Each structure stands twice: as C-alpha cells, then as structure tokens.
Image: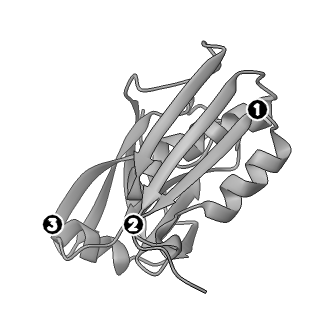
C-alpha cells in the first residue's frame, strides 16, 4: 500500500536516535517485524529508504519507525524534518515476523537493530500472548539502549518477556 502522509510526531529516544510517527490509515495492516519504505523530499529530489516498524500493529492511531542519525544524505534530510512535512510510505514488506507461532523464542540484537523487536514485544504484550520471549539487547553504553524504559514497562506488563541488556562500556558508580 502506497500513501502520502505528513509527519505527526518526532520523538527523541537517545542522543542520536529518534522515532518518527505518521497517522495510520485504517486499511494498513502489517505484522510485527515487518518494514516500510519512506520517501522524503529534499529540494527537488526524492530520497527513499526502508525501516522496520517500531510501532505495533495493535497501535491503531499511528505507525512509527526509528532511526539512528548518521552523516548520510537521507539521515540528514530526516533529521531536518518537522511535524507536518510531507512523506510517502509504501508498506508492509518482509517476512521477519512473529505473532506467537512458537511457545518460546530468543531475540538477539544490537543498537538500532531493536526496531523490529520492539514491535514484536509490544504486540505480544498488547495481545496477551503466552509465548516466552527472551530479548538479548546489546549496545555500547547504557545511554545507547533505545526503548529501554518502554521495554522495562512491557516486561512488567508481560511476565513472559525477559530482558537481558548488555553494554560494552559499563559506567562505574
């Protein structure tokens, strides 16, 4: 499904990561773990890139993706985007999904690779799935753990979700 839309909300997640939300069309169905293509305008040029949904299909009012900022052209254009700016979305794509098909799974990711897994974990918690999920999530520092607070809240809501955070450069107190 392709549609034109506008940025609804931009949410800073860490010092170099933000989430971008758009209104969700009622007819857009996707599975947790899938991805979308987004196109932005920069002057007279269109820039496109794909991202995993960081929203859950259970969230009916918006869709979201999350990006770590770099010095690449698309990233710089995205960082300059504001609420109300135009975008085109083409979604959903991908078969890297989980909707409770297995009684037990382990998810392993690092850095911004958390995005399909936050969608999967939100969906499992919101739907009350009984499968056991263990998420192993590694980053350089504690401050780089994107969605840490949200994941901890999901683990409180869903006793079947176990979180294992790993950091390269632990802070000493």
Which tag, 1 or 3, sits closer to the chain's start?
3
Cβ atoms at labels 1 and 3 below 8 Å apart: no
Q: Quadrant of residue 71?
A: bottom left
The reply, left or right, for residue 25 in relation to residue 15 is: right
Whichever of callouts 2 and 1 sits on the residue coming sooner in the sequence is: 1
**Where residue 52 sits: x, y (%)?**
42, 44
How many numbered marks are there?
3
Q: Nearer the viewer, residue 127 or 86?
A: 127
Tag 1 residue: 160
Identify the residue under disc 2: 168
Does residue 146 appear left or right of residue 1 in this picture? right
Q: Nearer the viewer, residue 103 or 31?
A: 103
Relative to 92, does residue 9 appear above or below in the rendering?
A: below
Question: Which quadrant holds the C terminus?
Answer: bottom right
Secondary structure of the residue carrying numbered label 3: strand
Expressed as whole percent of the image width and height from the top left, the position of residue 40 reads 30, 63
| Label 1 to label 3: alpha-carbon separation | 46 Å
Q: Nearer the viewer, mark 1 or mark 3?
A: 1
Residue nearer the viewer, 108 or 75: 108
Mark 3 → mark 2, Cα distance in angstroms: 39 Å
Q: Secondary structure at mark 2?
A: loop
Residue marked by disc 3: 45
- For the point 40% across and 22% down, the residue is 95
For label 2, the crowd category at 10 Å Cα-Cα, with few meaning under 14, some 14 to 19 and many 20 or more, is few
Q: Looking at the rendering, in which quadrant would you find the N terminus?
A: top left
SS at badge 1: loop
Q: Quadrant of residue 67?
A: bottom left
């Amino acid at each position: 499904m392709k549609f034109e839309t506008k940025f609804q909300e931009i949410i800073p997640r860490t010092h170099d990561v933000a989430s971008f939300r758009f209104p969700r069309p009622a007819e857009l169905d996707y599975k947790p773990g899938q991805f979308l293509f987004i196109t932005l305008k920069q002057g007279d040029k269109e820039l496109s890139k794909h991202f995993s949904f960081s929203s859950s299909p259970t969230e009916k009012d918006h869709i979201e993706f999350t990006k770590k900022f770099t010095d690449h052209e698309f990233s710089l254009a995205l960082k300059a985007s504001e609420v109300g700016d135009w975008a085109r979305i083409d979604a959903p794509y991908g078969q890297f999904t989980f909707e409770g098909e297995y009684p037990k799974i382990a998810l392993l990711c690092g850095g911004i690779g958390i995005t399909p897994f936050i969608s999967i974990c939100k969906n499992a918690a919101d739907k009350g799935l009984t499968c056991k999920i263990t998420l192993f999530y590694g980053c350089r520092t504690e401050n780089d753990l994107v969605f840490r607070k949200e994941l901890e809240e999901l683990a409180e809501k869903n006793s079947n979700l176990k979180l294992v955070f790993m950091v390269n450069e632990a802070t000493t107190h």
